[in-house]
Image (spheres, helix red, strand yellow):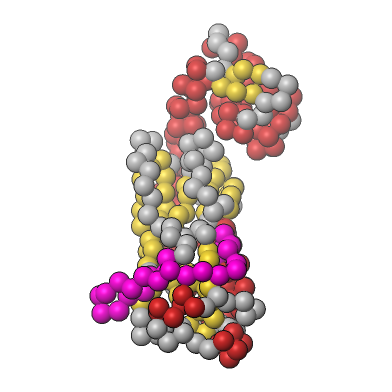
Amino acid sequence: MDIVDQLKAFVATAQTGSFTAAADQLGVSNRLTSKYVAELEAHLGVRLFQRTTRKVGLTSVGEDLLARAPGLLDDLDDILSEVSEGSQGFSGVIRISAPVTFGELYVARMLGRFASQHPNLSIDLRLSDRYVDLASEGIDLAFRIGVTDTLSIKGRKLGSFESVITASPDYLAEIGAPEMPEDLSHHACIVDTNRRSPRRWTLFRDGKELPVTVAGRFHVNSAQAACDLATDGHGIAYSPRFAAAKALESGRLVELFPGYQCEHSPVSAIYLEGRALPRKTRALIDFATHDIRAAQIV
């Protein structure tokens, strides 16, 4: 009997909600995953799941075990990694969440650079603009932009990014450039609904905050989509500088209001509080802290 495999099967099934999805995550058969869970239930003498024809749900005992089992598996993986890392580097899996645009433009390549130093390490990157539940989805580390209000998580600030207001040369030639921030209320603005206050764009000058309420035909939940629409002449975008950087460099976008400052938002590495952080996760945070500054993404 391998209690470790049984616990891994239990955790994967609890986090995914099905034996099939758990088997895909673990890289084993559906039948073997179900077998491991059944053996664990027999060993403990309790039922961990309520099974239906469509999904499995945790019993109260299963919920108690799920609260502790991932930490136990992390600790075991940490011990084994520490013993072997001198010659082989880190091993196992790190599950990571990141916003879509930031993940595509930076996080994926950063993880590639980190993984190249640890050939036995597997990376599971999940891109989503929603704030995922780290505990229920089995996420080891999340890269997040903006302020996090959840009390059950901790984080390390990696830096901060500046926003920028841009438009295409074609748009400016046809409509004209806004001279003052308040002029934005008369322009077609592309609203990024991922921002905390999507229709309230704030600029600063001489320490004074200058908020403007904007409107437009396009509402999108992607900074990259907002930049793409602005590049095609559909309006003015307020986006992270890293999302607009290539278009600004090529001249397809023009930065507006050079005498003003736009908002800065923190970029942080977020993890669950109350659990010992595995060495490989700590190493990834340290790597990202230096890499993100070297890449001049913030």
At x 46%, y 84%, the residue is 178
Image position of 292 with respect to 236: above or below: above
At x 54%, y 54%, the residue is 129
Does residue 127 show up?
Answer: yes
At x 51%, y 58%, the residue is 194
Q: Residue lying farthest front? A: 186
Which is nearer the eye, 198 or 84?
198
Report the quarter where the C terminus lies. Answer: bottom left
Does residue 83 show up?
Answer: no
The question of residue 136 being in magenta is answered with no
Q: Residue lying farthest left? A: 207
- Residue 134 point in image, percent of width and height: 48, 41
Image position of 169 with respect to 214: above or below: below
Corner quadrant of residue 251: bottom right
Q: Residue lying farthest bottom? A: 173
User: Which stretch did the figure color magenta?
Assistant: 200-223
- Residue 51 point in image, percent of width and height: 66, 18
Which is nearer the eye, 199 or 270?
199
Report the quarter where the N terminus lies. Answer: top right
Q: Residue lying farthest top? A: 45
Image position of 213 with respect to 151: above or below: below
Q: In the picture provided, is 155 more to the left or to the right than 33?
A: left
The question of residue 210 being in magenta is answered with yes
Corner quadrant of residue 13: top right
| Number of marks present in the image shown | 0
